Amino acid sequence: MNTSKRRSLSLVLFAAMAMLLASTSFAMVREVSFEELTELSDTTMEVAVVNSYAEWNAEHTAIFTHYVVEPLRQIGGRTRGASFELLFAGGRTTDGRQMIVTEVPQLEVGGQYILFLHPRETRHASPTVGMWQGALRVVRDPATRETVLVDTNGHIIERDANGELHRGRRMNVEAGGFMTEMAAEPEPGMAADPVLRDPEGRIIPMPRNAQAEAVQVNDRRPVDPDTFMNIVYEFRNNTPRTPRVNE
């Protein structure tokens, strides 16, 4: 078999393996609430990512990215040591081969995350419950200088007046974990508000679109990591308390 045919076959096998791995844990990733993420996970852990590398599995059939993390605090489950590895399906190896598995989150070295983890002894395409939904990044809002949380798709985690958690508006996350506003894009098919003018060509002021204004006015507020971890503790124990800090 010549080189080009072998390369084509390899690409087909990579694509098939990626589809298989993506369907191993979730044939279709459904939306999971934060309370359900807590119930389904073995532990909720805040970690710092200190290193990463990608390599083939033992059978040389799939690529996994290994993230070396250091736990900062956790709720539930057994401790996993001062540092340990988490394996996520997909990645690029030193030989230039790459495998992409949709819905599997990608972490950044130097980043800080809150992860809802499966039991250590189980193997999934992603060690986080709900795939990307079980990985939240700790970022800093330069406008307020406060730390908040976003999911790996960039949606900021917010809490409403009733204490319910939501995935809110989408944000940009810059290098170093700084959050910035994402430019608003009109929805497909959305027409611009009409502009009316008087006989002299002057614009006639019009009331703002009531629906757009209603969307902007809400009672949700970004959640900081400490508040979020205490909410998770309440989900697990129904009793508020400051979570344990790993020393």
Image (cartoon, rainbow, N blue to C red):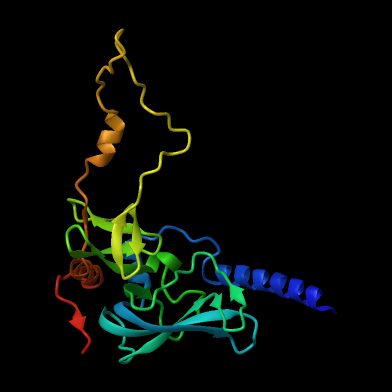
Please identify the quarter of the rendering in which residue 40 is found. bottom left
Q: Which residue appears farthest toward the bottom when viewing the image?
A: 81
Q: Is residue 62 left or right of residue 26?
A: right
Residue at image point 80% right, 78% down: 3
Task: Tell me the quarter of the picture where residue 217 sits.
Answer: top left
The vertical placement of 17 against 59, above or below, is: above
- Towards the viewer: 198 or 26: 198
Q: Quadrant location of the C terminus? A: bottom left
Q: Position of residue 105 (x, y in %)?
A: 45, 69
Query: On the picture, is 227 further left or further right than 116?
Result: left
> Residue at the location (30% across, 57% down)?
180
Q: In the rendered image, is residue 167 in sight? A: no
Percent of width and height locating residue 93: 57, 81
Does the rendering let one see residue 156?
Answer: yes
In the image, farthest residue toward the top? 199
Question: Looking at this view, is 189 or 61 the one in front?
Answer: 189
Vertical comparison of 38 with 171: above or below: below
Residue 23 is situated, as x and y percent measured from the top left of the image, at 57, 68
Q: How many marks?
A: 0
Q: Nearer the viewer, residue 192 or 31?
A: 192
* Residue at point 80%, 73% (across, down): 5
Q: Quadrant of the N terminus?
A: bottom right
Q: Nearer the viewer, residue 163 or 45?
A: 45
Q: Position of residue 166 (x, y in %)?
A: 29, 55
Residue sitting farthest toward the front: 200
